[in-house]
Amino acid sequence: MAIPRFWKSASTTAAALLLFGSVQGQPSAATNNTPELSGFPACDALVAANLSHAVHFPSSPLYRSLVESSYAIDTRKQPWCFVLPSTTAEVSTTLTALRSAGGGAGDWHIAIRSGGHGGDNQNNIAEGVTIDLTHLNATTYDATTNVASVGTGARWGAVYAELEKDGVTVTGGREGVVGVGGLLLGGGISWYTARTGFACDSVVNYEVVLASGTVINANASVHSDLWRALKGGSSNFGIVTRFDLEAFPAENLNMETRIFARKHSDELIDAIAGFASLNQSMADNALISMMTYDPKVEDSSIMVVEVNTRNTANSPAYDAFNRIPTLNPAITKSVSLVEAANSTQLSGENRNAGAGALTIVNDPRVMRYCFEQYNGIVEDMKALLGPKNFTTILDFQPLPSYFADIGVKKGGNMLGLERDSRDKILFVMGVTLLGSNSEELYPRVYQQVAAMNKRVEEFSKSIGSDIEFRYLPYADSRQNVIGSYGEANVDHIRTVAKKYDPNGFFQRRVPGGFKIDRV
């Protein structure tokens, strides 16, 4: 339980096992049914480059599973073909072939997918090719350097399970099904952020394939400008095939979950604000609070998840929450990171309407305004969708100012949070449609959620409590994420992108995501 999405139990199919069970260097056992000539210039170029074993046309038995492996139903596009490289060398061959396919002409494009949890067109595409990095999923640990090497296509649950064998772990995603690549390239909030910084701050080296097909390493000593730019700079430079991460000893997490009635929202807001202002002496503690609407009872409640990363129960960091009455007795458990990451799974089976995360100053006035707006949205949704046909989430995640200081000490990242020394809150609001007419009503719901986000943004500005930063892994396509990093970081990303991708391949041919050329 960690990021503001909705849950479901895990389900697997034989095709999915073929897809996700493969390891780096081992192509899928399923036959591709690859035609000699398809008429799709990009796909034919891949076959001509001796990648036929990795190319999946609609005739492939894995094609449907590849389409459906994108998280959200609106991102499950049907490209001309998928290509699943199994090695860094095959990624290089893939880019070289696609760069010159069709003489560079045609209105087709490329999507790059790691875990498939990005927004529309970030990880799949209809007119063109999707590069699926699922097979680049190896995780290894070098005890002599205390560095874990993780393939970009791995999922965090599998990463933690492999590293647990050596008694270590890394700073990564809170949900086991989330992919490594997108989270690390977008920053990455973790249970350990208060101790180690954003997940990207723990990357000591990137293995990167450039548009030219050249493979380089980027770290503090070599290509250090790219190393820093990749910490939040997303898919503007090349394809990262491997991340080398600082490791630390694995310990159980003490997790306590409390459910509160909506009538206690004022007390909870004060408690959240107090937690977000704690200093670094409380860095072993993490917290997420979520208000959700339950269509069964037609009312909202607030769940608070308290996590101590040193497996310490009854931390004083949560004293303010412990004084507030709960609807049910709190649930406390000591679990491994593997168990925590795999305890819930994100669901994209229903239409989710979210307008992206906002960052606000740790100001109870803004949080109360968010709750007021949330209550209004719930009433609007009851009228529009019916009280049984939707659920919601309003999520607050504390971002104390020292999170940014950790990143600066580790060489800097692109997020730019150090520009404002105030403690912050990450705010996310969304609606999930459950009715049979969800697709028809989605545009109206999205419009209302986007308007609510704008009202919160304008209110926070009006009282001087707005923060420019937009968190990329939760961002909506209408947001200027890269631009929110600040002028100096925008200039750095632009300079580095032009240096390592001088012809703009990742700006023109790979349009999905947040591109520096649009800033």
Image (tube, grey):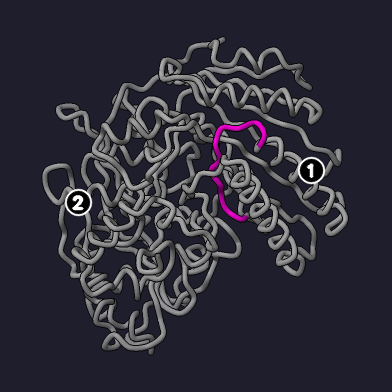
Q: Do the residues under discs 1 and 2 have CB atoms within 8 angstroms?
A: no
Q: Is residue 502 left or right of residue 166?
A: left
Task: Check the picture and name the quadrant holding the N terminus.
Answer: top right
Residue 236: x percent and y percent? 32, 62
* Residue 184 on the magenta segment: no
Residue bounds of the magenta highlight? 355-365
**What's the residue at 37%, 34% (across, down)?**
404
Q: In this image, 156 relative to 383: left or right?
A: left
The image shows residue 119, relative to residue 172, as above or below, that is below
**Which comes sooner in the sequence, label 1 or label 2?**
2
Which of 284/157 is in front? Answer: 284
The amino acid on which the numbered mark 1 sits, given as a three-letter code, is Asn
Foreground pick, 244 / 59: 244
Q: Position of residue 397 (x, y in %)?
A: 55, 35
**Residue 105 seen anywhere in this rendered image of the structure:** yes
Residue that label 1 marks: 375
Q: Position of residue 431 (x, y in %)?
A: 70, 51
Q: Tell me which amino acid carries mark 2.
A: Asp
Residue 222: x, y in percent?
12, 48
Residue assigned mark 2: 225
